[in-house]
Amino acid sequence: MSNDTKIILGIKDPNIKKLKIMNPLEVKGPLKVQALLDYRPKACTKCGVLNQKSIIKYGWRWTTVKLPQAVERDVKLHLKKRNFKCKQCHQYFLAETSLVQRNHTISNVSRISCLVKLSETVSMRHIANELNISSTSVLRIMRSYQPDIKTNYSWLPAVINMDEVKSTKDAKGAMSFVFMDGMRNEFIDILESRTLYDLEKYFNRYTKAAREGVKIIVTDMNYTYPQLTETVFPNAIVVTDRFHIVSSIMRGFNRVRVRIMKSYANSNINHKILKRYWKLLLKPNEKLNFNVYHNFTHLSGINTENSTVDYILSFNDELRQAYELLQTVRRAVKYRHTSKLVTILDKKNDYPEELETPLNTLREHQESVYNALKYNYSNGPMEGINNKIKVIKRVSYGFGCFSSFRLRIHLVFGIKKAA
Ligand SMILES: [Zn+2]
């Protein structure tokens, strides 16, 4: 009987004996189990002296251990632990078990399942409910993971992706700095602040060899991060995220479209067309269909996607110019035609103002923009990590201090790695 109960409750320690369920017939409430923990200690846990009849049994101490659910009921184990006295150092100590850490009431099994659940993007309240422990305990178990996050200051990846996410309220900066290993696509860390001063201070903790090993930094068109190559990463070049190049021009094009749309009255058919077909205008030109004819709302007769776009562009020369620029940049980036991009950035073409702004930004980052066409690295993988961080932030609501936030992120990305 006792052994079967142990198996059901997942108790493996052979020193836990005489298990007895105190309320087997009750249907509600936790299952109350009694047991005792006793063995002959090999040595004193206080002074370390080997037990050569120098440690004597000295009564019992009752403790409570919360076990994970069994047979769909919470389990409360009243464990009677043997107390010992060491004749050498005259100190007392309690029998220990792998079932529960010293001075804890939550079993190691619960602790581990709590950490596993924390590594999934579910709320802390949900975890607390499921494991029948308080939210404070969940937080405490999470904090106990802190020593497991050790930064190795003697290594950095050859490719680092850098980005930022909105931070917690108590954090030093409104945005937190996130960086990842661009080769293995793995999260590395999140920092409270993203100022040049703080980033240099942080990265300078790494060995010179680790910093010199960084060859590529992938980032959006940010002004801070590229400066790190002048100080902490002497051998690194900067690669602008290529999706960022296209999207900055795309935003410019959209502004032109909206301005032209607004030049027509709301009731004007051109206004309606420019409002309705914005998506079609952003579609890669070579993907527009040119042989399937059908009815397009607000347009007369039947048309193809291609003829519709052509018709819309005939409204305004500036719109056509902006459209052609967007398509050229998109193609240059996609097919890595650096020379085409150079031609666009080199000459001072009189583009609409909405496009001159993003073009000037590209000109200022020319070197890293051209690198984006030369190398295969982008911030695409970073997006996945950032999305996950956003979910973690949402489910950790209520425990919103930065150190807990960071810990939870490490749990989510770290436990998976170890598994
Ligand atoms: Zn002792």
Image (cartoon, rainbow, N blue to C red):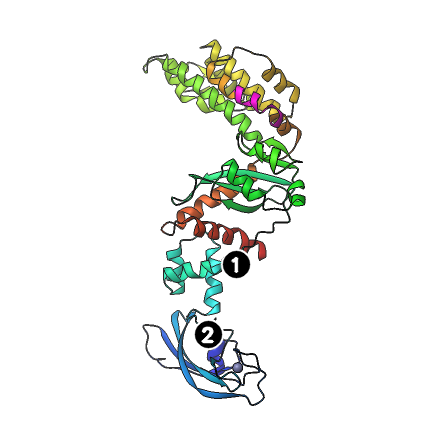
417 over 70 or under it: above or below: above
Q: Is residue 170 above or below residue 276?
A: below
Residue at 54% x, 16% y: name it.
324
User: Residue lying furthest front in this view?
Assistant: 89
Q: Residue 9 carries which label?
A: 2
**Quadrant for the C terminus in the image:** bottom right
Residue range (magenta): 359-368
Residue 392 place in picture, x, y as percent: 44, 48
Image depth: mark 2 or mark 1 in front: 1
Query: Residue 371: x, y in percent?
Result: 64, 28
Residue 231 visible to the viewer = yes
Q: Label 2 neighbourhood size at 10 Å, few (<14), some (14-19), many (20+)? A: some
Name the residue that disc number 1 marks.
147
- Residue at far bottom of view: 53
Question: For the residues marked 2 and 1, what is the alpha-carbon distance in whole angstroms?
Answer: 29 Å
Residue 166 magenta-highlighted: no
**Image location of residue 160, percent across then percent down:** 60, 40
Helix, strand or loop: magenta stretch: helix
The residue that appears at 45% across and 21% down in the rendered structure is 254
Query: Which secondary structure, mark 1?
Result: helix
